[in-house]
Amino acid sequence: MSGCLPLVCLSANDPALAKRLMDAGAHGVIVPTVNSPVDAERAYAGGGILLDQGLHMVNLVRLFGGEFTGVKSYVSSSYWKHDVEDNAYALMRSPTGRTAILHSTATQWQHRFSLEMALTEGYVELQGILSSSKSYEQERLIVRRRPKSVTGTDREKVITYLEDNSWRDEVWEFARAAVGGTPLASGASWDALETMRLVYRVYSADPEWRAIWGTRIRTAPTGSRESVGRRAGPRTSDGCEPRM
């Protein structure tokens, strides 16, 4: 019938299925088994602080550390008592032995952003964000060289950033790829998918959270598009998706 909007009723409360249907052209989805405002909140939000804010740190962890397949986690909603998490703690390890520790929280009352990397010849720390809210600390990059003595680092370089050109640079890169066919250096759809898989691997690694919300790890069939390797390294074949 002309003039009707294509709406789809889901067979399960599954955000991944909803995304595929929206991509296929549906204008909206009807979520089943929603019996309360709490259910509706989780159905549309998908997750809490980890998915909302911690997602960006997960992406940075992958950018600098590669893929992480071993994950231990603790996910909690003990403070706000919502059906989405207010704290997520994760210990992750890559197949090459790199280790990352992540804490995403909605109970640190002063907005903070801190990324620390210990390297063979030194140490790098990124503090703060140049956000529009101005609620984070000043954005600084601290580079420390590995000391020759055991008394501590005596060589340090601090760079303070006064303007954020990241959005401009991303738009320009996308425009060059769309108009001129230039390959994307980062931030393609496959990269976003792998970041989401790692986020849901964190959710799934907590047995209590998994028992409550039914998040599970799904293995992609060998040879499928989901098991195709990353441009910069191997892509893990065990993806994660929510089953709520």
Image: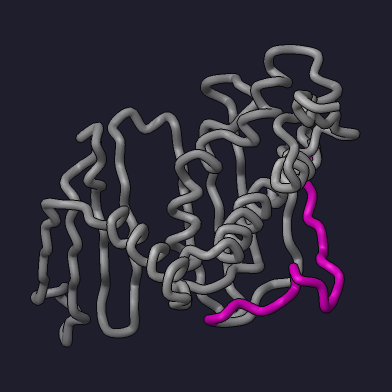
Specify the farthest residue to the right. 11
Report which quarter residue 158 is drawn in. Answer: bottom left
Observer-nearest residue: 58 or 104? 58
Residue 94 placed where, x, y %? 58, 73
| 13 sits to left or right of 70 | right
On screen, residue 195 above or below 38: below
Magenta region, residue range: 214-232
Q: Residue 43 location, x and y as percent? A: 71, 28
Residue 20, image x, y percentages: 75, 47
Name the one closer to the observer, 85 or 232.
Answer: 232
Q: Is residue 207 visible?
A: no
Q: Residue at horizontal 44%, vertical 31%?
A: 106
Q: Residue at x 77, y 43 (%)?
A: 21
Judging depth in this view, the residue of 214 and 29 nearest the camera is: 29
Whether 144 is drawn above or below 81: the answer is: below
Q: Residue at x 67, y 54 (%)?
A: 201
Q: Main secondary structure of the magenta part?
A: loop
Q: Is residue 154 visible?
A: yes
